[in-house]
Amino acid sequence: MALDTEHSLHATDHNDPHWTQRCDLAAAFRWTARLNMHEAVANHFSLAVNDDGSQFLCNPCNRHFSLVKASELLLIDANDPETMNRPDAPDPTTWGLHGALHRRVPHARCAMHVHSKYATVLACLEDAVLPAIDQNSAVFFNRTVVDTNYGGLAFEEEGERCAGLFSDPRCKVMVMGNHGIMIIGETVAETFDRLYHFERAAETYITALMTGRPIRVLSDKVAESVARGVDEYPVEQADNHLNELRAILDGEGSDYAS
């Protein structure tokens, strides 16, 4: 079913049923830019807003992350073949990657794709697996898929191929070989928190490699224990993380939630 593109262009009514999600996603864009994990006016985040995940919010084409507002996020239907003919059509690679994810991967409610520095360096290594060398990296033990078959810009064919690699529901991170990273999750908070910590873990690993000294890797048993412990952690760390970031933005008078 085609969506009301006029509403997606001018969704300033705070009675919008997705307003909270819009504000969360806009805050994630703003903070990603602040962390210098953006790529000029490229890269993209999305968030499913209906039951089957096929309708999703995403950033407008060529909008800098530091300027994204909740009201201007596009509402896209992954099953609408006319999407790229809309007057406010998303970037073709947004449609290629995120359209495929929201059609094919039900547990990918939120998806964040960036070319952040350290994760991309990792993606360019011959062995792009992140070893469990500290607590942050252990969180991702056996929960990451590495794509070694980069096929070029993520238009529809490449997007479909990448979506097919998320077959294991435990894997919420894709190291996109020679490209960047894709993080998925249930909510904006969960996904952004995972993105943040994966980049931190990649930074630690790349920095350790730069020392040229031997690296001590945790045992599989310990790494799995850490990963499972985070999976089952009793405190909503991700929600608290995003709430604090929104509080900082609000205190600064940011217009992200407009």
Image (cartoon, grey):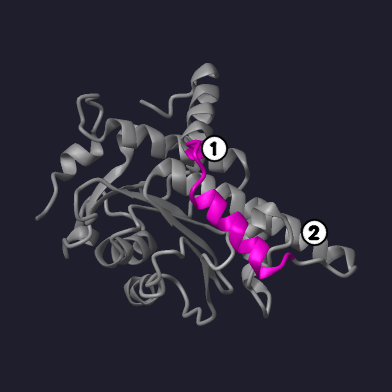
Q: Is residue 217 magenta?
A: no
Q: Residue at x 27, y 54 (%)?
A: 89
Above or below, 22 relative to 248: below
Q: Position of residue 26 (x, y in %)?
A: 41, 37
Q: Is residue 233 magenta?
A: yes
Which residues fall within the magenta stretch?
218-238
For residue 125, what is the image quadrant?
bottom right
Tell me the residue that label 2 is attached to.
207
Q: Residue at x 49, y 45 (%)?
A: 192
- Residue 31 - label: 1
Residue 140 pos. (x, y %): 58, 60
Q: Position of residue 157 (x, y in %)?
A: 34, 77
From the image, state whether disc 2 or disc 1 is nearer to you: 2
Q: Nearer the viewer, residue 224 or 157?
A: 224
Disc 1 residue crowd, few under 14, some 14–19, many 20+, Cα 10 Å = many
Locate residue 15 relative to residue 35 in the image: left or right: left
